[in-house]
Image (cartoon, rainbow, N blue to C red):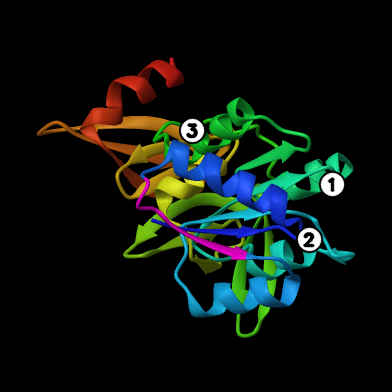
Amino acid sequence: MKILIIEDEARIAKRIERMTRDFFDKEVQILLCDSVENGLSVIQTNSIDLLLLDLNLNGEDGFYILQCVVAKSFQTIIISAYTDKAITAFHYGVLDFVPKPFDENRLSQAFTRFTSPEKQTSGDVQFLAVKKAKTIKLITIKEIKFIKGAGIYTELHLADGRVELHDKSLESLEKLLPSSFQRIHKSYILCWHEADKLIVEAGGRYNMLLKNGELLPVGRSKYKEIRHRTI
């Protein structure tokens, strides 16, 4: 696992690094940066799994980094005293916002959200970001009907029929999305508002009929949970 810490105060950066190594395996690879420019350079040249980001970097706005990399496949945890920016950060789909000053327990809670397969979302995310050429395009959550796994990417299927490719995996998105979204199959996450009815077919096959007439497969392991929700 490769973790990038972007923090301009050396003492705090080392403290975060120590706490990170205490929580994860001692062999985890940790990269340290102290500026917006250096941070973006490392992100462009390394495949990281988790970003720990401060929002005040020697007077520079760390939020610029978040805006630039929000569409990438890794998760982001903000560690900052600028709590007034927490809501905006969650809207961009960060995994957690750890306010300064912080202790090891609070940082461990954030790391647990990262490692846990279960959804632990605050429900604040309002849009997902996708890369279009050299720009970032924001897709509002309300536009998404369902999300389909597509190899190392995911497909965002939108209400107007468009399909946008996203870098984050289904597992990563499942942690971020509000409770109105549910995993119905190993390859599908559905916006529950789009569901019409659950269909049981011969041979123990299950499908979800959407309000627009589309059919999505329902996994056998998900059937009881989904049936309970539709009752």
- Disc 1 target residue: 85
Magenta residues, as a range? 26-32
Instruction: Residue lying at the far bottom in this picture: please name it.
Output: 133
Inter-mark Cα distance, 1 to 2: 9 Å
Disc on res. 112: 3
In depth, the one of 83 and 123 nearer the eye is 83
Helix, strand or loop at mark 1:
helix
Query: In the figure, residue 65 lies in which quadrant?
Result: bottom right
Crowding around mark 1 (Cα neighbors within 10 Å: few <14, some 14 to 19, many 20+) is some
| Residue 7 point in image, percent of width and height | 71, 57
Front residue of 133/67: it is 67
Task: Give the distance between the C-alpha atoms of the residues marked 3 and 1, in whole angstroms.
Answer: 22 Å
Kind of element beneath mark 3: helix
Instruction: Please provide percent x and percent y for residue 145.
Output: 54, 49
Q: Report crowding for label 2: few under 14, some 14 to 19, many 20 or more residues within 10 A (C-alpha).
A: some
Determine contact: label 1, label 2, CB under 8 Å. yes
Q: List x then y, in percent, for residue 134.
A: 64, 84
